[in-house]
Amino acid sequence: MRRGSGSGGLGQNLAKYFILSCDGGGYRGILTAQLLTLLTHDRPALLGRVDLFAGTSTGGLISLALAIGDKTPSDLIDIYTAIGDRVFYPDNEVLPVFGAKWTLGLDALKHEVKDIAGDRTLADLKRKVVVTAFELHDATPSHAGPHGAWGPTVFTNVDAAAAPALAGNPAGLRIRGQADATPLFDVALSTSAAPTYFPTHGRFVDGGVTANNPALVAVAVALSGATPPALSDIYVLSLGTGAPNLYVDVDSEKDWGYVQWVAESQNNVGRETLIQVILDSSQDLAAFIGLKLIGQEHFFRANPVLADAIPLDAPEFRQTLLDAATSYYATYGQQLRDWVDRTVLS
């Protein structure tokens, strides 16, 4: 037995609990949207079977849009095209030394996010979501948790009553749920406020600094309900934004400071080398742990390898990213469809 619509809450202990997890990766989210467009064309029932949408940063935008339900993956490609044209417009770029790189494009980003989120709150959603961020705090004692004044945050419409393990948890994770009446507009901007790329959104920065691949966060939330699904019943489709061909020469030890790690271009990485290292390493590690935790039959990772060094904010690679998704699907699509048929749709 399984829920047919994916609209039920956590904790019903029904078999085949399906999580759709979408990585962060900036404009490369258009690749994820293309993968989903191709897959849902062949398996149109797939999104209706999702029990929990999970997303970080650009993947958070995708997950929220799909959970709301009035945007198709194809619609998301159009939204990313608009983001490329209006947010990452060359005249909007500033040197990220005394301010964020794309501050001048923030209003355009807010416009696109508003188109996705409208005036809805987490409580308005019928489908379940998990979106990651990192929360900063001031020195007010009441704002500090048991593990300090800042830390990772999860936005979710899994309420604390249905998931008591999420309330007052000892791990320092902050839960922003239905009781906060958090507007989806703010959730989307919080998870996508990438350091040095965009300003903070209030006290929040991009979830990619803690969980660029949110698959494990989603599994943990799913297991935290009052009557959670068994671990053996959880299935995860984890979608990346492409693995860019980035590198730094290692012919000698790197005696690097702030300038080299953050401000200077290194080989084909460009600036923000340290941020790229953090984002890429966390998403690959999460995929490895997920595969080992719930097993290869339960965890499908799709993350095409990119021939080019494509940064997070390069809409000039739009067609390259679409083609990479299409090529991946042509090669691995049958394997992916078979997995979906066998594990999710059966």
Image (cartoon, grey):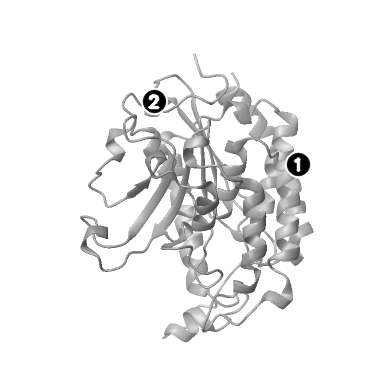
Q: Is residue 328 visible?
A: no
**Residue 312, position as x, y percentages in the image:** 62, 64
| Tag in front: 1 or 2 | 2
Is residue 26 rendered to the left or right of residue 16?
right
Looking at the rendered structure, the kind of residue marked 1 is: Ala
Residue 229 disc label: 2
Which residue is at a point 66% across and 77% down the rendered structure image?
93
Which residue is at a point 28% across and 40% down the rendered structure image?
167
Which one is earlier in the sequence, the residue at label 1 or at label 2? 2
Q: Is residue 318 above or below residue 327?
A: below
The image quadrant that residue 319 belongs to is bottom right
**Please, which residue is most extreme toward the front here?**
119
Question: For the residue carrying disc 2, how many other residues have a C-alpha within 10 Å: few (<14), some (14-19), or many (20+)?
Answer: many
Looking at the rendered structure, the kind of residue marked 2 is: Pro
**Residue 88, position as x, y percentages in the image:** 69, 68
Which residue is at a point 31% across and 27% down the rendered structure image?
226
Residue 330 disc label: 1
